[in-house]
Image: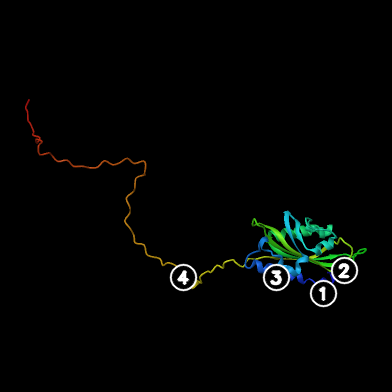
Amino acid sequence: MTQHVSNTGFSPLAQVEAYWEALRGTRLMPNRAEIDPRGIEQALEYSFIVERIAPGIARLRIAGSHLSDLMGMEVRGMPLTSFITPGSRRQVSDTLEEVFETPAACTLHLHAEEAAGMPALDARMLLLPLKSDLGDVSRLLGVLIAVGDKGRSPRRFDVVRNSLRPIISETATAVIRPTPVEADQTKPKSVPVLPTAPERPREPAGFAEPRASFKSETPRKDAPYLRLVKSDD
């Protein structure tokens, strides 16, 4: 296995990233349920999936055999930071939060110092966000590859540098604005307003009493006319 890794270097990282990009298409990221092991068969032993269980903490749910070889034990259920030295764990926790929250893809360059029975070892870790079945960004598809003789386990790594790449969806709709000439043509022309006669003042609604209608009365035909009666009394 070690000889195979030495010959191919870190190429499985590119294979998994290309698979992830093909799945997401124009979206921000693919769903966890879309990941098919057959799609990354050549990189399966270096691949893993983690679940976010708290801010800065991600637990391994699935892990390839290469990860177990580095730790010398079964690693499923362990925090991802188990592969990192205590001095670099805070940096990895912050990086995990950026990958989940931005979202972003990240490549970590790692190095293990030489010790008794442990030759110096270079490694790389790739982190790619995934949506869970609930639609939240709480899963990661990852790859961890150490190149060289791993020596005695467990092996833990310092972070040399990281490369964070924010993910941008390609489905954003472009906004098309008219040119100044087009804007002038589409702008409605002003119409002159003719003066109108002043309106009669309206009485305040709710406070005015109804006006009594005017009705002229003429004498009825059957009613006698008034006559002037003069009396000297």
Q: Position of residue 111 (x, y in %)?
A: 84, 65
Q: Residue at x 72, y 68 (%)?
A: 40
Q: Residue 34: x, y in percent?
A: 66, 63
Q: Left or right? Give the position of 188 relative to 86.
A: left
Mark 2 or mark 1, which has the lower sequence index?
A: 1
Q: Earlier in the sequence, mark 2 or mark 4?
A: 2
Answer few, some or many: residues within 10 Å of disc 1's Cα (few below 14, many 20 plus, some between 14 and 19). few
Residue bearing mark 2: 149
Residue under circle 4? 184
Q: Amino acid at mark 1?
A: Asn
Q: Which mark is residue 7?
A: 1
| Image x and y of residue 176, in percent | 53, 69
SS at badge 3: helix
State which tag comes first along the sequence, 4 or 1: 1
Q: Amino acid at mark 4?
A: Asp
Real-space Cα distance between discs 2 and 4?
72 Å
- Callout 4: SS: helix
**How far is mark 3 from mark 4, CA to CA?**
48 Å
SS class, disc 1? helix
Circles 2 and 4: CB atoms closer than 8 Å: no
**Quadrant in the rendering for residue 192:** bottom left
Q: Which mark is residue 18?
A: 3
